[in-house]
């Protein structure tokens, strides 16, 4: 527990922050990993850590570093995933390097002041994302769905700019061939609000596929809403390392059971009724 910024409250407040990994597929979605984020004022106070039963080998790690460790654990466990989507906290640095070395594509968000530059493109692209978007022509924008929402399709205007092609050997990627670094921009149809994403994908990947990947974040948010409303994810008043992990792990287990039951129920074919003849 400590005073820190949390997106759910939109401000700095006393809270506990966790980093979560969610698996999303056509068959369903559920949490697969979690990590408790400890601020520096916690990890620098060994007595405080001892009182909360934090293991001795735990040191300060940024949220992207925690996410990278979870990605590596998922790969080692054989989780079958080809893409990663995330919000802007994880859009640069540790997570990018981990995914590139593993040969996994990504579409994480970035802040609008993130700088992008192209190599050998015509015309050359260089500048902050918020300054690149206004220079695009209407022909560069395409209206595509990011998936089903609560009521209808989530339609936005999208623009995709491939920036550079790199060979897999340059970054020790196990999947041979060229990969493309790019910029994906989403524009709200109603108010023109922009959201920007850094992309990494095998060369030739379509914008439609990148949009589909970004759209999976809706399912991730759905996981959190359901976990809080149905399984008490945010009803946690524990003050210890093991207490937090036990509570969160039980919520994850309950969610996984629900996801499995939902898939099985939706997969059942309705029984055929036989007509009686006279």
Image (spheres, helix red, strand yellow):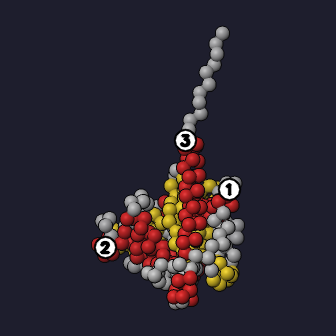
Percent from the top left, x then y, of residue 53?
53, 78
Q: Residues within 10 Å of mark 2 (few under 14, many from 20)?
A: few
Q: Which mark is residue 250?
A: none
Depth check: give the residue in front, 6 or 202.
6
Question: Label 1 belongs to which residue?
Answer: 150
Q: Which mark is residue 172?
A: 2
In this rendering, position of residue 191 left or right of residue 220: right
Depth check: give the residue in front, 56 or 169.
56
Which residue: 42% across, 58% down?
Answer: 80
Which residue: 58% across, 43% down?
Answer: 266
Relative to 217, does residue 40 appear above or below in the rendering? below
Which residue: 44% across, 69% down?
Answer: 71
Percent from the top left, x then y, of residue 39?
56, 84
Question: Label 3 belongs to which residue?
Answer: 267
Q: In this rendering, which labeled residue sits more in front, label 3 or label 1?
A: 3
Question: Marks 2 and 3, Cα distance to the nearest angstrom?
Answer: 41 Å
Q: Residues within 10 Å of mark 3 (few under 14, many from 20)?
A: few
Res. 114 visible in picture: no
Count of marks, rendered view: 3
Question: Marks 3 and 1, Cα distance to the nearest angstrom?
Answer: 21 Å
Relative to 157, does residue 241 appear above or below in the rendering? below
Depth check: give the residue in front, 63 or 218.
63
């Amino acid at each position: 527990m400590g005073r820190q910024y949390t997106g759910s409250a939109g401000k700095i407040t006393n809270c506990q922050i966790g980093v979560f990994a969610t698996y999303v597929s056509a068959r369903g979605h559920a949490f697969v990993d979690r990590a408790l984020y400890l601020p520096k004022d916690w990890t620098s106070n060994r007595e405080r850590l001892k009182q909360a039963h934090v293991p001795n080998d735990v040191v300060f790690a940024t949220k992207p570093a925690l996410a990278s460790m979870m990605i590596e654990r998922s790969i080692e466990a054989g989780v079958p995933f080809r893409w990663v989507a995330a919000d802007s906290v994880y859009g640069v640095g540790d997570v990018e390097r981990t995914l590139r070395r593993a040969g996994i594509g990504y579409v994480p968000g970035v802040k609008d002041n993130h700088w992008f530059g192209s190599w050998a493109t015509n015309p050359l692209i260089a500048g902050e994302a918020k300054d690149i978007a206004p220079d695009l022509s209407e022909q560069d924008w395409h209206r595509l769905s990011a998936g089903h929402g609560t009521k209808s399709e989530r339609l936005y205007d999208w623009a995709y700019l491939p920036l550079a092609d790199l060979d897999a050997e340059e970054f020790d990627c196990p999947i041979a061939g060229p990969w493309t670094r790019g910029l994906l921009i989403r524009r709200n149809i109603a108010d023109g609000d922009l959201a920007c994403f850094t992309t990494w994908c095998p060369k030739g990947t379509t914008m439609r596929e990148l949009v589909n990947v970004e759209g999976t974040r809706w399912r991730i948010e759905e996981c959190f809403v359901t976990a809080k409303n149905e399984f008490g994810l945010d009803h946690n008043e524990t003050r210890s390392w093991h207490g937090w992990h036990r509570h969160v792990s039980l919520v994850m287990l309950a969610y996984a059971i629900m996801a499995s039951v939902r898939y099985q129920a939706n997969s059942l074919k309705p029984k055929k009724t036989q007509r009686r003849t006279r």
